[in-house]
Amino acid sequence: MREREGSIGAPDRLRCEYLHNPLGIEEPSPRLSWQIRDPQRSAVQSAYQVQVASSPELLASHVPDQWDSGKVATNQTIQVEYKGQKLQSHRRYHWRVRTWDGQGLVSPWSRLHWWEMGIMESDLWKGHWIGPPLPENNRQPIPCPYLRREIIVKGQIRRARVYITARGLYELYINGRRVGEDYFTPGWTEYHHRIPYQTYDVTEYFREGPNAIGAILGDGWYGGHVGGFMRLRLYGPAPRLLAQLELETEDGTTQIIRTDTQWRISDGPILVSDFMRGEQYDARLEMPGWNEVGFDDRRWRQPVAEPLDHVKLVAQAMPTVRSMMILAARSRTQVRPGVWVFDMGQNMVGVARMQVQGPTGATIRMRYGEAVNSDGTLYTDNYRTAQCVDEYTVKGDDDRDYGPRHHSEAPLEIYQPRFTFRGFRYVELTGYPGDPPLTAISGIVLYSANDATGEFECSDPMLNQLHSNIVWSQRGNFLEIPTDCPQRDERLGWMGDAQVFIPTACFNMDVAAFFAKWMRDVELSQRADGAFSDVVPNALAFRDGECLNFDHHAWADAAIVVPWTLYQYYGDRRILERYYPAMGRWIEHCRLNSDGLIRPVGGYGDWLSVDAQTPTDLLNTAWFARSTWLMRRIAAIIGRNDDATTYERLFLEICRAFNHRFVTPASRIIGDSQTSYALALCFDLLPESARQAATAHLVENIRQRNDHLSTGFVGTPWLLNALSDNGRTDVAYRLLHQQSYPSWLFAVTHGATTIWERWDGWTPQAGFLNPYMNSLNHYAFGAVGQWMYQNIGGINPDPEYPAFGRFIIHPRPLESGLSFARTKYHSIVGTIASAWHIHNDHWTLTVRVPPNTQAEVVIPTDSLDQVTERGLPLNISPGLTDCREDGKLVRFLAGAGQYEFIIEIERYHTSTKQ
Ligand code: BGC
């Protein structure tokens, strides 16, 4: 039967395991998603059909040989599991989807998309790990090895794939051409257990006859300095490459090239390349043509080749690190003769690209800093022992003698370090021949290529700058793993930092695949007794045989918060199921190691709070309760109803113990800190009767501090919520607008372009704080970004409905002191927008609800009569239902569509002032 076609467009934004056409995945039943295109108000999807085939031609001729879901009556558009034929290694699967609308009319088929499987069975890997001999000196980084091999391709290539990884980092070339645009591949995981590999389509790189393959290896996380204790060779003594090239020719034969002793190895121009030290590059040692056919490699040696071992090779499952932006330098200053400092105008993470023309052998040094001293010289103390120096020795043109004034005649050389990065805003150049032009330096911004999903703008430029600082700190610290900071000798996956920031991170970028990959390593870092480590991958695990960093609340709890947040923002139920046992072990560990359900003192406490003492046993017990409450929710979602009841009971018992131990009859919480009140209120630890008094104590504390905060990492993300959820949005805004220390805007008033680790990273009185711990790019305090999206913009997930299938629009303009705000969130189900402006005696709110979703709109006015939608009363406006008054609020449901509400505010003012 022919389907009746409607006016709806073909579904788009097709994704497989959150990725666009992923090449080389291993998930045996990947999950698919799409967005529907239907401009009608209240548009819904009533059914879908997915078809998967082994070739595009088969799909075009309606032969879905791998899977045809048939017409499935559901509004589900995300997390749709593939349920077809068993997926085979190496094969590409083509898919398309069509949808039916609420009237039963069908859409056109989507454009074709695909995913391709990697190497799913470990015995298909057959190569050797190849690389240089073990270094003699275990304390020195070694030059980066260059590897090459020539092969003869017999016949026309039909398809070529390379599966490649390294112990260390690699860059691959075929016939002189770089393969891919990725940085720092293969990425960082718990290398003792698993190492990611990448798959590249290299069909276009090969030709019939002789071909050359080349690779450069770097130390990276595997063998270079890793932060924390600045350990060198944490995972192994020397870098290694492992690659498998599979070439299919037109006649159907397959040629497989592997890494083995047929390759050749040599040192090259990169003398050192280390994340913490920087890179030393001598362009005079370049070997033109080393990765092309016909290069004379007789002086190269045979590499060491080691067989594969038990460590699992796993497909890259998230966006790689890429060059995401290039910043031009804003200014340059000669701070001392021959010493130039370039200002990129933005604290960023990546490397500098330098252009130079100069005499052979001239050596130029680039040093980096996040800040400058008052005399304009570079401030590097807060890098601690991370030297971050790049040195480039000019190749020049030996035949000519360039006097100092004739550099412009020398060939232009462009240098960009390969296997290193750091956080910086300023670049210091010394040894540059002549006066460097402003274009001598540009900033290559590197981070994991997670799509941007959030937009925020309002009438206060200070808040816009704060938002920008939050996004830049996320960019700089979402490099393979969520790190604490990108500059000093640390740069580790601190669980606490990730946990406090993840909701904000989800608003700013699509981080589903990024965190899903990290979670696997979180699980691997769990100790047998259930405790989690504080950093993942666990680069700190042992010092002198002693286990240092486990079992710290608000850090370890990331193991529950991260999956929970991914479920909320992306509907990822599989991640809840997958890590449920590990999460349960953590709760059990806490239960067994508590005294009457009070967790012991210890841990990091409310890290970097100011002038406030939140007892650590209080904080730990509050987090024990929070994680237990989340487990109750998670157990119910995945159908473990008995567990849900057990966790519920445990949660209530912890609350009882908490109140008994830490809360006075007058609802004062021991420590009397903003953090204690914020956690108790937001984690729902207090009896209903105590909430009002506890809120009043919190407000009083803030008033006594003249509207300043005192919270550290643990309390900060909850502070404003504790106020706005308990009727004191006015106080929340006063804190947010505060410009003097300690406050979010204090750093902004002093020119910060990223979030600082400490509230007082720099003060006019004391200058830079103790350099021992003073990162100027640490996202934790940027956790307020979530509150800004949710309360200024008004875009909120509804905890009962994952992945924004239904969400809440609840902007709070009237206490905001702002005249407009515009926010957007490109959610997994479509773009949500909420924008408003205040004009004389009314405010206008425009809301966009994506197809197949619903918004509960909450408007701060007490009467339905005060609100119209495009001139119509709410109850007759198409798309709106369940309109009702609820105290000082008006609530209603809005189906898909674009709405414009006008609300009279004269009356609002009168009603709230009473
Ligand atoms: C890191 C933090 C981390 C903390 C643990 C610091 O050195 O930079 O962000 O959470 O240690 O207390």
Image (spheres, rainbow, N blue to C red):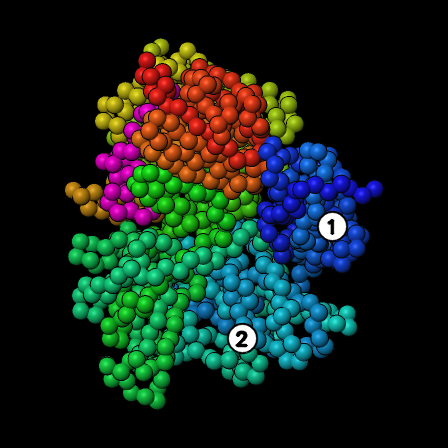
| 65 sits left or right of 662 in the view | right
Residue in the foreground of this view, choosing between 685 and 271: 685
Residue in the foreground of this view, choosing between 253 and 876: 876
The residue at 46%/18% (across/down) is 865
Q: What is the quadrant of the C terminus in the image?
A: top left
Q: Which residue is mark 2?
A: 176
Q: Which portion, as a residue range, is magenta?
A: 727-754
Q: Compare marks 1 and 2 and give the one earlier in the sequence.
A: 1
Point out residue 824 in the picture as x, y percentages from the top left corner: 47, 40
Indicate whether 113 appears above or below 210: above
Q: Which mark is residue 190?
A: none
Point out residue 562 in the picture as x, y percentages from the top left corner: 51, 37
The residue at 77%/70% (across/down) is 252
The residue at 77%/47% (across/down) is 67
* Residue 538 visible (yes or no): no
Q: Which residue is mark 1?
A: 52
